[in-house]
Structures are given as C-alpha cells and as structure tokens.
Amino acid sequence: MPAKESEKRPNARNRSTPLVLTLLLAAAWLLWSGMFKPLLVGLGVFSCVLTVFIIRRMGYFDRQVYAFRYDLRLVGFWLWLLGEIARSSLEVARVVLSRKLRLSTEVIELDVSSLDQVDQVLLGNSITLTPGTLTLEAHNDKLVVHALTAEGARSLRGGEMKRRVAALHGGK
C-alpha cells in the first residue's frame, strides 16, 4: 500500500528542528566555553553539526516520543524552575546551617501516568535540579523521590511542578 502524500513529505517542523537544535547547541557551546578563537569556534561548530547529523541518522527526529516542542512556555518553565532552585537553595542552606539540624527526610512516590515519557524525564530532572530533592527511580509511571525536608516533600505532593511540566504541552 503506497504511503500517503503527507507521510512522504516531511513537514516544516521536522525540517526546522535539526536547525534549531544545531543553533541551541552552538549557543550553549559558545556560552559555556567562553573561547572565541577561530579554530575553537570552528571545532565547536563542527561538533554541533556532527552531533545533529548523527542523531538525525539515528532517526531521533522521526519518533514522536522524542519530538521536543520549542515555544515560550518552555522559557517560562525555565524561569519558574530557576526561582524554585533559588528558593530551595535558601531552604537547604537554612536547614544545614541551623544550630539544631532538623532534617525530616522522606521518600515519596509520585504518580506520573498522566505525563508522556519526555515529560516524565523532564519532571524527574527538574526535581533532581531542585536542591533538597533527588529523583531516585523512574519506573512504571512512578517517580520515587527523596526529599531532605517535609516541606520539600509536601511541595512535590502538591503537584505544582508536575502541573507546570504537563502545561508545557497543553496538558492539565
């Protein structure tokens, strides 16, 4: 059975995704390296193009599970996450530097069955980036998380981070 015409032609989004990824990789490389000598910039551009070439050959952009959506909601999420990281850093510093070390560690399990695989990974990584919390395991639509304080565990159970991750792709 012949493929439909729409299945033969890649859509504009599939064609632009490698370009956007190349530009993001190049920008990150330039910012993190801080080196602007022609040879190093050339090697950086080469490594970014080679990386995108290899993952394109692997079919990375052909699978919907890996399709990453770039829009302003992601930037908003990053800004919110930076605020959470700063807030949690202060809370952990307060707990660690207090005269009486009042740790109330908890291991909790979060149900993430409402999120797709990419969003589950994003949520697990966001939890781990936030000081005082660590994703221990991600399996069978569950995240097992260690929280340094009861407040951190309560915050995760409240679901604000999960809600914001789901909202990135139009979820609830």
Image: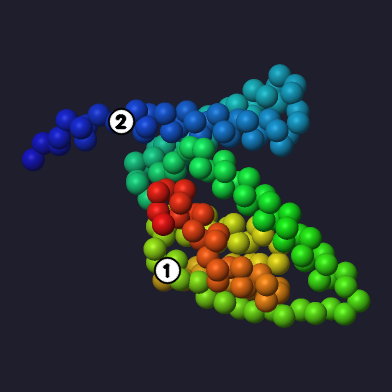
**SS of the residue at dot 2?**
loop
**At which x and y percent is residue 165?**
50, 54
How far apart are the two marked residues, 1 and 2, measured between alpha carbons? 31 Å
Residue position for label 1: 141
- Left or right: where does residue 67 sit relative to residue 8? right
**SS of the residue at dot 1?**
loop
* Residue 152 in view of the camera: yes
In the image, residue 44 sits, relative to residue 64, either above or below, namely above
In the image, residue 19 sits, relative to residue 75, either above or below, namely above
Residue position for label 2: 11
**At which x and y percent is residue 96?**
83, 70
* Residue 121 in view of the camera: no
- Left or right: where does residue 79 sit relative to residue 90? left
x 79%, y 60%: residue: 90
Q: Earlier in the sequence, mark 1 or mark 2?
A: 2
- Left or right: where does residue 56 sit relative to residue 148? left
Most distant residue in the top direction = 38
